Amino acid sequence: MKISAPLVKALNNQISMEANAANAYLSAASWCEVTGYDGAASFFHDQAEEEHQHMLKFVNFVNGQCLGAIIPGTKQPPKTYKSLESICKTALSNEQAVTKAINHMVDLAQKDKDHNTFTFLQFFVNEQIEEEQQFENILQKFNLLGRDKLAIYEIDKLLGSLGTSGSDSEN
Ligand SMILES: [Fe+2]
Ligand SMILES: [Fe+2]
């Protein structure tokens, strides 16, 4: 079945969102690295890799339907950050925007009775639940442990422990 034009547009837009997410996490990882947050650096490197895999999933899906995927240019991510907490806050709101975009595509697929695309998108519906929960949990730690040096040290360690054991190693 041919994918409708609005859905093709949304799928290509999603390639761009995932590419920007990968870049934003890489930028966060880089800042954490030079700031001495080793655990967080490794966590955000993993996130960047995961987003890159997401982007490839969309590229492969679009190309698999004999439509040419559009490989996007990416936005310049922030060069510096206020704090580890502010990175996590921005990450949560970016993930919420991605969830919205995914849900919009699910709506379109449903409207089009496009079962193929609908099924493809289910991975991302589940993925976004995990991604949002993950950052909500991390942000909660700042409230529980505090924001002094020792608390940040603990949170950095915790982020390091989330590492590659992350939720969707099946990518
Ligand atoms: Fe993603
Ligand atoms: Fe994500």
Image (tube, rainbow, N blue to C red):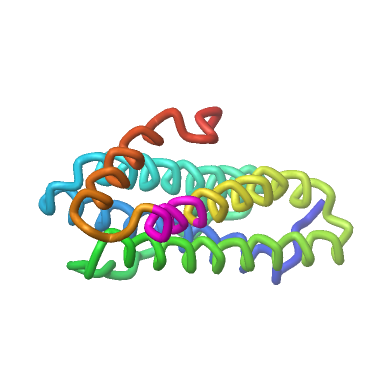
Q: Main secondary structure of the magenta part?
A: helix
In percent of the image, x 78 and y 56: which residue is there?
2
In percent of the image, x 61 and y 61: which residue is there?
99
Q: Which one is in front, 167 or 136?
A: 136
Part of the protein shown in magenta: 136-144
Left or right side of 138 for 128: right
Q: Which one is in front, 85 or 78?
A: 85
Residue 96's place in the image compared with 122, above or below, is below
Left or right side of 39 for 52: right
Left or right side of 156 for 161: right
Q: Residue 38, position in %: x, y?
A: 20, 41
Q: Residue 11, position in %: x, y?
A: 61, 60
Total numbered badges shown on the rendered structure: 0
User: Is residue 143 found inside the magenta-colored segment of the image?
Assistant: yes
In percent of the image, x 56 and y 63: which residue is there?
98
User: Is residue 106 found inside the magenta-colored segment of the image?
Assistant: no
Q: Residue 19, position in %: x, y?
A: 41, 57
